[in-house]
Image (tube, rainbow, N blue to C red):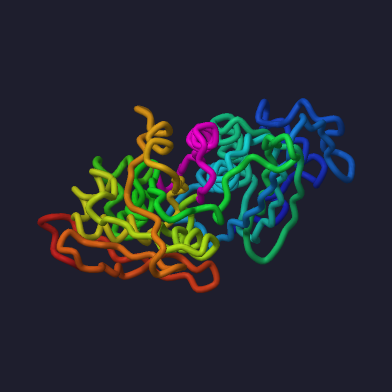
Amino acid sequence: MGASQNDRWPLGEFDLIDRILARLGDAMARDILVPPGDDAAVWATTAGGAAGTIDVLAEGNHWRPDTMSMADVGWRAVAVNVSDLAAMGAEPQQLLVASVLGPDVTLDDLDGFVDGLAEACRAHGIRVAGGDIVRGNATSFTVAAYGRVDLDAGGEAVTMLRSTARPGDRVAVSGAPGASSAGLALIEAGRAGEPAAAPLLTAHRRPVGRVTVGRAALAAGVRCAIDVSDGLLQDLGHIAWRSEVGIEVAAAALPLHPAAVTLLGQPAALDLALGGGEDFELVLTGERETLRRVDGPELPVTLIGHVVEAHPGDVVVWSDDGEAYEPPSRGWDQLRPQRLPEAPPEPGRAPA
C-alpha cells in the first residue's frame, strides 16, 4: 500500500514553511526589510532600474521524474530565471517561489527541491525573498526573479534588448549550444550511464545562467542579446523579428560540444545545437571587436554569423557547400512541444 497523506506530510502549513526556510539557509535573503510571514516581502533597492522575469516549470513539460531529480528541478527553477536576467545584462538580486505539489510529491521530494534551489541560488548570487506552497492535481513551480540595471543620464535603462540588432553586426553565442538537448537524448536512449555523457547530463540537469557573460557584454557595449531557451534558431528569430533584420548563421562555425559529436555524431550534434533548446547560453550581436571583448578563457564566446538587411525576420543557416540548411526542428514552442531527434544507439549495439 502507498503512503498515506499524513505519512507524506506529517507537518502543517506553517511548520512546513519553517522547515523550508531553515533548509534554504544562506540562500534565503537576509537583507530584506520585511521577511516571509506577512502578505509580501519588502526589500530596499539601490539606485537604478528594476528588472523582473517569471517562468513556470511544469512536470511532464519541462521535466520528468525519469530525466532528473527534484534537486535538479530546484536548480533549474533558479537557472532559467537568472538566464533571462543575464540576457538583459541585469544583476540578479531576489527570487519569489510558488510551488504547486501534485499528489505523489513527498516531504523528501520537497526537501530535494529546496536543496537544489539553495545550491543554485549560491551559484548564481541570488537569494529567495519569499513564496507560496499549495497542493494540486499536478506539480509545477513558478519562480519570479528580480534584478537591477543601471540608468543613463536621461533615465533610460542601460540594458540589452532583442530589438537593437543592426545590419553589419556579427552574431556570437556563448558556450556550446546543443549540450543540454544532447544530454536529454542520451537519457531517453538509455545511454546516460556512459562516462562520456557526464558533461551533457550536467548541461541538461544543472544549466548555468550566464550572468558573468551578460554583465561583461553590457560593459563592453553590446546592446542586443537573448538567451537560448527554446532553440538557437527560434531565439535568433525573435531578434530578427523584433529588430526587422535578417540573420545568417554558418553551420561550420557553431561550437558543438565534443561529447555530443562523439556520442551522437556530428549531424545529430549540429541539429541539436540549432534547435534543441534549454541551453541557456547567450546570443549576442554587435561589432566584431565589441564581441571579442566578451570572449574569455572560462567561457568562450564564438562568432557564428551576421546580421543582414535581406530576408528581414528570417534566420538562414548556410552549410559548407553554400546551400541553405534546414534542421528537423528550429526549436520549441511551449504550447506545441515537439520530441527531440532520437539519439543513435551506442556503437556496436543494435537498435531496439
User: 47 left or right of 186?
Assistant: right
Nearest the camera: 7 or 272?
A: 272
Q: Residue at x 36, y 46 (%)?
A: 201
Q: Residue at x 85, y 30 (%)?
A: 33
Nearest the camera: 52 or 33?
A: 52
Q: Position of residue 184 (x, y in %)?
A: 37, 55
Find the magenta span and give its range.
203-226
| Farthest-out residue, right | 38
User: 96 left or right of 66?
Assistant: right
Q: Residue at x 19, y 55 (%)?
A: 266
Residue 207 belongs to the span the image colors magenta: yes
Residue 175 belongs to the span the image colors magenta: no
Give the answer, above or below, for where 42 lies relative to 349.
above
Q: Position of residue 13 (x, y in %)?
A: 80, 47
Specify the quadrant of the image occupied by residue 27.
top right
Q: Residue at x 31, y 41 (%)?
A: 198
Whether residue 54 is visible to the viewer of this picture, yes or no, is yes
Name the quadrant of the N terminus: bottom right
Whether residue 70 is visible to the viewer of this picture, yes or no, is no
Nearest the camera: 15 or 321?
A: 321
Q: Position of residue 73 (x, y in %)?
A: 54, 48
